[in-house]
Amino acid sequence: MDKNTAREEAKKSIDELFDEIEKLELKKEAAEKDTKAEYAGKLADLRLKQKELELKYKALADSSEETWEEAKEDFNMSLESFKTGLSKLKSIFD
């Protein structure tokens, strides 16, 4: 996969995942008190992962040919960590 295609796919992935956070924010409002506390903690963790993912995406987008592979690997690890956190947050309502 070339660099531009990878950038586009990376941006699409994070945009879709970040939209999921907004949906989960709405669910938090309807949750029970004890569930809200658990949810709030996991949501705060996910927001930190979101910021990290945004930084990794910027590094990926700005990478040179020499740093491309490392930036791509860092982004992919951050993306997987974010997806895991998102799944954990969603599981509260399953």
Image (cartoon, grey):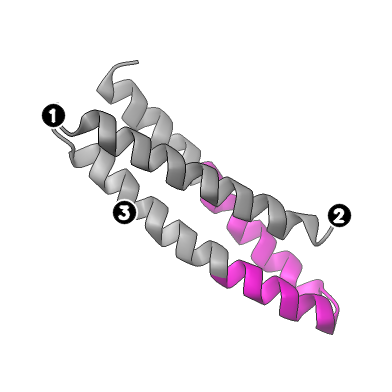
Q: Amino acid at mark 1?
A: Glu
Name the residue at 27% across, 39% down.
60
Using the image as rendered, state which of residue 23 and residue 65 is in the foreground.
65
Q: Is residue 13 magenta?
A: no
Q: Main secondary structure of the magenta part?
A: helix
Bounds of the magenta span? 16-44
For disc 1, the marked residue is 66
Rendered image: mark on residue 94: 2
- Sooner in the amino-acid sequence: mark 2 or mark 3: 3
Q: Residues within 10 Å of mark 3 (few under 14, many from 20)?
A: some
Which one is in front in this view, the residue at disc 1 or the one at disc 2?
Answer: 1
Classify residue 21 as left or right of residue 27: left
**Mark 2 element type:** loop
Q: Which mark is residue 87?
A: none
Q: Which residue is mark 3?
A: 55
At numbered mark 1, what does the secondary structure look like: helix, strand or loop? loop
